Image (cartoon, rainbow, N blue to C red):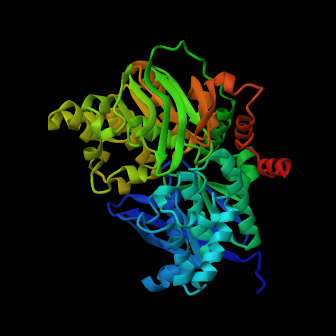
Amino acid sequence: MTRDMNETILKLTDLRVEALSGAVLVDNVSLELKRGEVMGLIGESGAGKSTIGLASMVYARAGCRITGGKIEIQGEDVRVLDAEGRRERRGQRIAYIAQSAAASFNPAHRLMDQVTEMPISHGLMTEAEAQAWALELFRALDLPNPDTFGNRYPHQVSGGQLQRAMAAMAMSCRPDILVLDEPTTALDVTTQIEVLALLKKLIRDYNMAALYISHDLAVVAQVADRVMVLRHGKMVELGETGQILLEPHMDYTKALVAERKAADKLAMIATTTREKPVLEGVDVTGIYGTFKAVKHVSISVARGETVAVVGESGSGKSSLARLLVGLLPCVTGEVKLHGEVLPPSLKDRNRDTLRKVQLIYQQPDVALNPRQTIGEIIGRPVEFYFNRSPSEVKARVAELLRLVGLPEDYAGRLSTALSGGQKQRICIARALAAEPDIIICDEPTSALDQLVADEILKLLKQLQDTLGVGYLFITHDLGIVRRIAHRTAVMLQGEIIAQGPTADIFAPPFHPYTEKLLSSVPEMRTDWLDEVLAKRA
């Protein structure tokens, strides 16, 4: 069948989404998406980007409802369909890649079963055909050991690998429309290039259309034909990608573009004179089953110091964090706090040790209890470590919410009512509640837009200056490393291959792997990805 490239495949008209409280989350937004076209949705955390993406599938999160507008897929108003009709279109006609893959997979089922479920249940493929297509997708997404990758459970792969598995699951039915909600957020820069190139190829080869939701303008610039800028649920500006990057019309758009460009030009932080280390890992090794995730690594963080750990997905960064806090016991070496050797396992460490080393997780969706209020989540460490009265806990929670830039009345909300960026700020507030000496930050700004991420980084720096807290900062954003890290360690396959002052790590001559990482940071121009791929061909 010949597909008309001028066909409007998705059309939203005066879309309105409200919370049950009456708050307007999306305020009469309209858009048209043609076959083969990618539209980027840009805006700060809570702008309504993900809400629009979900609404295009006639879906609203718990506590929200679609209250107005038409949602048409190839001319059919899917909003008027019954529940069964909507289910038939989801996956087969329109598919979603969520921001948090870890919260989207069933931990009790193998990855292959979950990737093949949709085409089999929709009657599009036999089990053998679905598995063959899944293996092809695993190879295209450069997943490790693709022939056996599907035999693993979600917890047995890294965050970046799980995000790519979700891309395979979304493509399993070869849908007409993809809703890509931060699909490269959990990926390192080298893998991000491969996934962006793959997504462009899939959209072109299968004549699909896509909504690409992101807070990173440089990433959107590589895949989007047009960009819609959103704020407070309203459309601020809509234009061709080049126009948005080079000649934005609205003040808010100008601020987003300026902030992103400024992030690329910021001077590198100066190296400080090191104090005695607060937290040390000395020749530590961590194992999952028989797999060595961390191999004889030595690293330390001093008071008032930020040490960045960078590397590809699966290089061992998050495993190192888990090892230092005792979630993954070390099988060789020692972990020391203020010079004292800690028990390898978290359960054997005393309360004061637990308080002094806190962890901000990469995936806020799975780090927050959806049944507890924000006040209970943040207040628990205050009560646990300091034995404060209920009134003192309430006052401290309000103070911490203000510190991370959220209203005090959020204390009564559930985490399910918050955006991804807001959830991450709650995780930061919970870590701060323990008044720690060291905070291990595992991608704490990956879910945040550029403006909010900048606020969080400034907050962390302010806390470091006033409280002397040290940070082990795990990230794949090398721009952030330049801005905040006094020292940097580069990990590859569980080992540290380069370590030292950030200025030295980022100065030539580079280790070949470090050079690859640096050359993979997206730039604010539409032809950057094509140039990089051409050089590496």
Q: Is residue 105 above or below residue 232?
A: below
Residue at 46% x, 57% y: name it. Answer: 155
The residue most toward the left is 389
Can you say which quadrant of the picture contains the N terminus?
bottom right
Q: Is residue 121 left or right of residue 2?
A: left
Horizontal and vertical percent for residue 68?
Answer: 46, 71
Q: Is residue 58 above or below residue 459?
A: below
Rendered location of residue 289, percent (x, y)? 46, 52
Residue 150 shows in this picture: yes
Give the answer, above or below, for where 260 lies relative to 173. above
In this picture, is 467 found above or below 227? Answer: above
Q: Nearer the viewer, residue 439 or 279?
A: 279
Q: Is residue 176 visible?
A: no
Q: Which of 517 and 236 is in front in this view?
A: 517
Frontmost residue, 429 versus 495: 495
Residue 214 drawn at (x, y percent)? 59, 52
* Residue at x 63%, y 35% (from the top left corner): 479
Q: Residue 500: where, in percent of width, then height?
A: 62, 23
Drawn side of residue 355 relative to residue 185, left or right: left
**Residue 103 image-quadrant placement:** bottom left
